[in-house]
Amino acid sequence: MPELPEVETFKRYLDKTSLNQTIKSIKVIDDRVLDIDGLSLKELVVNNKFESSTRLGKYLLVNIGKKYLIFHFGMTGDLEYYNNKDHEPKYSKVIFHFNNGFNLTYISLRMFGRLDIAESIEEFVEKKNLGTDAYKMNFEEFKRALKRRTGIIKNVLLNQSFIAGIGNIYSDEILFKTKVHPKTKIDSLSESKTKELFTNIKEVLKVGIDKKGDLSTFPEYFLIPHRKKDDYCPICNSGIERIELSGRHGFYCPNCQKESI
Ligand SMILES: [Zn+2]
């Protein structure tokens, strides 16, 4: 599932290709990806422009006039900018046709991605109960938010109302780099571990953004290339273990990330 670095990559792609161009028309191929009715979407975008964009957690918010078009990429979402002369990309669900003969298509292999409209960023944050964006959060905000939480660290990192943008894969990497077991209770983290955790959230997300969200290009010393059964820790060579938490499968090194209980 696209996490913060992938969505940041979509944001930069949209900014580079599609901002400030008049949208001539829109084609909805499958309205199951719409959280709004097709007519409202058409009214919002046709004869208007994508003026600017903001990423918040795993969501991309595109400003059009006084409203926002919200892109969520679900499990398999993608964006592609292409010329009229080219073939329509496979699995296109909604296509924005620009005046310049190019198009932006919202692609989703399955139906989990969603397009929505919000009146304001504040309204959207409230509706989704979103916490501060993981890449923009400062240490004081992080500490304050942590104080209000209980539970185990992996679940807290995945909780979008605490910190927005981190999913299963990046949370594993952040915990691996911090040498913390995924089941560690957050109230047992020392001040220095909390600081280290915060630093590693930023660092791991930065690597992800620099790699344009492409997990296959992560260096060998990260956990990401080793997140599979029968693989070995790149630091200590112990066997990587799989853990199930709240229905998600995580991976960790039982030697580098010892349980502190
Ligand atoms: Zn290890």
Image: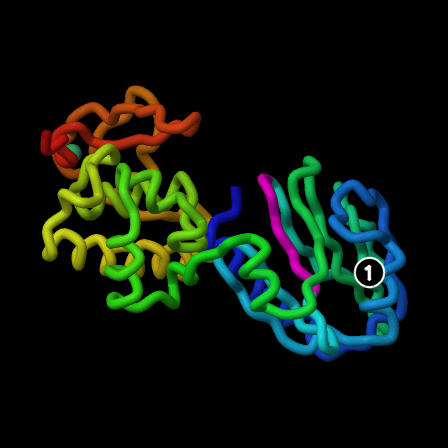
In the current view of this chain or complex, which residue is farthest to the top? 230
- Examine the rendered structure and indicate whether residue 227 appears above or below residue 76: above
| Image x and y of residue 97, in percent | 84, 64
Q: Is residue 101 at least partly visible in the picture?
A: no
Residue at x 45%, y 53% (from the top left corner): 165
| Coloration mode | rainbow
In the picture provided, is 116 more to the left or to the right than 241? right
Please state the horizontal and vertical placement of residue 37, each as a whole percent of the image: 84, 52
Query: Magenta stretch containing residue 201, yes or no?
Result: no
**Secondary-structure class at tag 1:** helix
Asked if residue 20 can be seen in this view, the reply is yes
| Point 40% across, 61% down: residue | 210
In the figure, 136 relative to 217: above or below?
A: below
Question: Could you say which quadrant of the image residue 33 lies in?
Answer: top right
Amino acid type assigned to the residue bearing label 1 in the image: Leu
State which quadrant residue 112 falls in: top right
State which image quarter holds ligand 1: top left
Where, by quadrant of the figure, is residue 136 drawn?
Answer: bottom left
The residue shown at (31%, 54%) is: 204
> Which residue: 71% across, 47% down?
107
What is the x, y in percent for residue 78?
A: 64, 50
The residue lying toward the viewer, choosing from 78 and 161, is 161
**Above or below: residue 86 compared with residue 62:** above
In the rendered image, residue 70 lying in the magenta stretch gets the answer yes
**Relative horizontal placement of residue 84, taking residue 227 as reference (left or right):** right
Q: Which residue is mark 1?
A: 41
Apparent side of residue 124 relative to residue 26 in the rendered image (left or right): left
Disc 1 packing (10 Å; few <14; some 14–19; many ≥20): some
Please provide the residue range marked out in magenta. 69-75
How far across and how far down the image is residue 177, in percent? Answer: 21, 47
